[in-house]
Image (cartoon, rainbow, N blue to C red):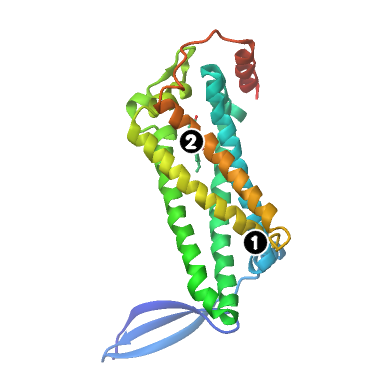
Amino acid sequence: MSQETLVFRNECTNFAGNRFILHYFRFSPPIFLQKGIVLLKKPEMNALGKALIGFWESSIGKKLIVAVTGVMLVGFLIAHMVGNLLIFQGRESLNDYAYFLHHFLHGWGIWIFRLGLMGAFVLHIVATIALVRENRAARSSRYAYEATVQAPRSSRMMIFSGLTVLGFVVFHLLHFTVRVDPDLAAMKDPMDPSRHDVYGMVIAGFQNPLVVLFYIVAISFFCTHLNHGISSLFQTLGLRSEKTKWITGKIGLAVTVILWLGFISIPFLSSVNILKDKGVPEKSAAHSAVIEATTES
Ligand code: HEM
């Protein structure tokens, strides 16, 4: 009598969307026999799932995702730059601000914000790549020259500067958020030793000329990426025409230059000792108000 042994299982879907599991058995004497068994039914998708898939599959849906997440990311950059510039007001302002961010909503606030930022970042990249592919496929059938020569060159530049941004963000998070340097991690606010001294950490973190050079080069690359990204955003949204080309270009450039100057100023001025540790100020009424508000939230 022949003996059967299960060799492998293979899950597949037929043209009607029904899911099968095929079991392949080996019988002795060795011949293959296939047993097809319908085990699973195509799951019914609810109305919300159908609406979400329809939204993602439409070109306007993806454009909306790119636009909303793009505005969120630029909004984060503007807020981060403005927050960082508090360093010019002194230790108390920057450390109060950092304390507020870390203790808002009993410490949950920063995690909600981080998740939102990560989600926006991932969605922005995935939807942009999907749109670029769709546009390229549509264009290559109409304008063979543009598709093969021009599009890859600008895409290559965006990929290169985008990778630089990714490298910068990883370095920056290790530098100031994870604080891999034990000297920077151990810095305590002399006004309130129970909290971290972000002010002292940033100034001390920019005493190494190589680190400063890295920040300046990486932020400059980042800004070229941003400038191109903002003008592509206008293009993607159909807001760039012959009439609006000038103004949209200037808006993108203005946002980029403001961010570039705002971010670059801190490492540059710290490295040449213009921005330096001003010592320990008297505690002000504003400081007590921040601590009280955060404790109550
Ligand atoms: C040279 C200019 C910059 C300075 C001085 C600076 C400073 C800082 C500091 C001190 C923190 C840690 C805050 C804390 O944990 O209390 C931080 C976090 C962060 N920075 Fe920057 N930053 C700069 C530029 C940038 C740029 C250009 C980007 C984006 C490309 C960026 C993205 C971030 C992110 C994503 C975090 C993590 C926020 C979190 O805690 O979840 N930074 N930065």
Does 24 sit above or below residue 244?
A: below
Comparing 129 with 248, the one in front is: 248
Left or right of 71: which side holds 153?
A: left
Comparing 131 with 180, the one in front is: 131
Q: Residue at x 56, y 40 (%)?
A: 259
Q: Which element is circle 1 on? A: helix
Label 1 Cα neighbours within 10 Å, binned few <14 / some 14-19 / many ≥20 = some
Rendering coords of residue 279 (x, y %): 46, 12
**Mark 1: which amino acid?**
Gln
Which disc number belongs to residue 264?
A: 2
Rendering coords of residue 294 (x, y %): 62, 22
Question: In the rendered view of the protein, which quadrant contains the N terminus?
Answer: bottom left
Rendering coords of residue 280 (x, y %): 48, 11
**Counting residues from the N terminus, which is met first, the one under dot 1 or under dot 2?**
1
Left or right of 296: which side holds 259?
A: left
Question: In the rendered view of the protein, which quadrant contains the C terminus?
Answer: top right
**Residue occupied by mark 1:** 235
Tell me: is circle 2 under 8 Å from ligand 1.
Answer: yes
Among all residues in the image, which is located at the extreme top? 282
Left or right of 207: which side holds 286?
A: right
Residue 83 makes an appearance in the image: yes
